[in-house]
Image: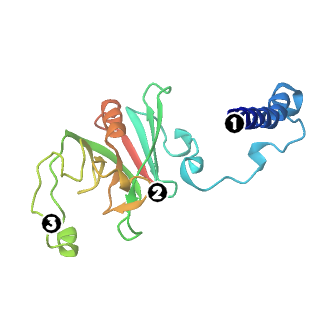
Amino acid sequence: MTSKLITRRAALMGLGASLASPPLLRAQSSDAFPQSEEAISDQPAVQRNISSFRQQKWQDHFDALGVGCLLADVASRAVHYWGEDGETYRLYPSSVPMSEELTKRGYTEVVRKAKNPRWTPTASMRERDPSLPQRLEGGAGNPLGTRGMYLSWPAYLVHGTHDTRKIGRQSSSGCIGLYNQHVEQLYELVKIGTKVRIL
């Protein structure tokens, strides 16, 4: 019985090695990099997950960098940041408003920043959900996460979230949400007066 097990194991190992050999050989040949394939730029973009993100140019959205620029792209659910040095660029997945009615588009700027921001639901939020508190201090149950950057539009923020399921989804009442670790990185880069476009 032992000799049968060894023979079976040896056969399986031999089969595995023979199946792996052709790809290994192709990877070492010039066939691994075909010269006749279409350019990636000529192929349609995949519209799902991170592959739908595309790097943007600040010049397509802003006249000047100033102290920095931030673009929230609602369609791709991504936040782009460019620093005033012209070199710093960050791209983060985000949550976006639940509906077009709740989406405010246009130009604004960062007017205030807060660590562990306090949350005060708007009247319309409390009308939709009367169980919401009047106010909630920063901390674990707070929907604004660990950092908040307030825009010149009242009640609109770029903020973190403790509920990571919201990122990449239409899940907010108007704000742009980021993973807490991402909003903490962005918070350190963004200055008061950073120009913002919600696209």
Q: Secondary structure at mark 1?
A: helix
Is residue 100 visible in the rendered image? The answer is: yes
- Residue extending farthest to the front is 1
| Point 24% across, 50% down: residue | 144
User: Is 114 on the left-hand or right-hand side of 64?
Assistant: left
| Point 32% across, 61% down: residue | 174
Q: Earlier in the sequence, mark 1 or mark 3?
A: 1
The residue wearing badge 2 is: 74
The residue wearing badge 1 is: 5
Q: Are marks 1 and 3 in contact (CB under 8 Å)?
A: no
User: Is 127 on the left-hand or right-hand side of 57?
Assistant: left
The residue wearing badge 3 is: 132
User: Is 36 on the left-hand or right-hand side of 144?
Assistant: right
* Mark 1 residue crowding within 10 angstroms, few (<14) / some (14–19) / many (20+): few
Q: Earlier in the sequence, mark 3 or mark 2?
A: 2
* Mark 3 residue crowding within 10 angstroms, few (<14) / some (14–19) / many (20+): some
Does residue 10 lie above or below 72 as drawn? Answer: above
Q: Nearer the viewer, mark 3 or mark 2?
A: 3
Q: Are marks 1 and 2 in contact (CB under 8 Å)?
A: no
Q: Nearer the viewer, mark 1 or mark 2?
A: 1
Q: Amino acid at mark 2?
A: Val
